[in-house]
Amino acid sequence: MPIFNVTGEVDPFLHISLAKGEKIYCESDAMVMMETNLELKGKMSGGLGAALMRTFANGESFFQQHIEALRGDGDCLLSPILPGAMRVLDIGSQQYMISDGAFVAATSGVELKVRTQSLGNALFAQSGGFFITETAGSGQLAVSGFGAMSELEVTPGKDVVIDNSHVVCWDNRLQYDISMTTGSSGGFLGNLINSQTSGEGIVLKFSGSGKILVCSRNRAAFLAWTQSKPA
């Protein structure tokens, strides 16, 4: 199986070593360098319908980059679009839900599937709407977060609330709900007003048992801040 290693502490690369015949796929424009034994192709994985659903659900490019070691062993370097940390996850007995823009690369045995969300979660989601991306199969998956990344462990009776913009991915065994406020009451209008005045935005409430990866930076807030500054 291809070997994934995150190299560097600040804005790291994803270093991948492939043996002859092995292949991986990654987000469009992720490839930085590859040795000449490797071949790069753009493919529409899973057919037209699957590619469209992944684009709407997770903000991925319609075409993905597929890298295969056709002529012998070889290495490549990949990099995510936004600056920040990366993490390699083992997929198999544990599967994950992936937030918008977090996917970097995966071994060929890992599949990115799109499943429907509940009506309430779909209406409040910032991206994806009725659809969200979930892993399947087995292998390794690399995800990225804007800024530093940290791992949280949710246990029964200790639910957590996380700003939607800081969530990278989470264990698919966790139960989650999306809302506009951390409050438990107040009605739709009250929650909307509280969300706007407190600056909470959209939050995800997780319960059950499992792991969540979060990042330190809010992409939407950073973009709004840069756009507010004079040229």
Image (tube, rainbow, N blue to C red):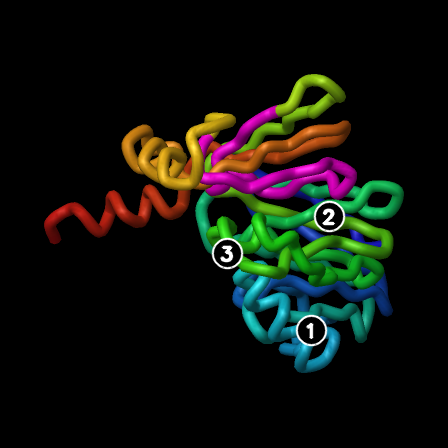
Q: CA distance from mark 3 to mark 1?
A: 17 Å
Location of residue 81 in the rendering, given as x and y in whole percent from the top left corner: 47, 55
Q: CA distance from mark 1 to mark 2?
A: 26 Å
Q: Is any atom of residue 82 visible in this view?
A: yes
Q: Are marks 3 and 2 in contact (CB under 8 Å)?
A: no
Crowd band around label 1 with a 10 angstrom C-alpha radius: few (<14), some (14–19), many (20+) = some
Q: Secondary structure at mark 1?
A: helix
Amino acid type shown at disc 2:
Phe
Quadrant of the rendering where the N terminus is positioned: bottom right
Question: Is residue 219 placed above or below 152 in the rendered structure?
Answer: below
**Residue identifier under label 1:** 50
Q: Is any atom of residue 14 visible in this view?
A: no
Q: What residue is at 18 percent from the left and 47 percent from the top?
A: 228
Location of residue 25 in the rendering, given as x and y in whole percent from the top left corner: 70, 65
Location of residue 84 in the rendering, given as x and y in whole percent from the top left corner: 49, 41
Q: CA distance from mark 3 to mark 2?
A: 28 Å
**Residue identifier under label 2:** 4
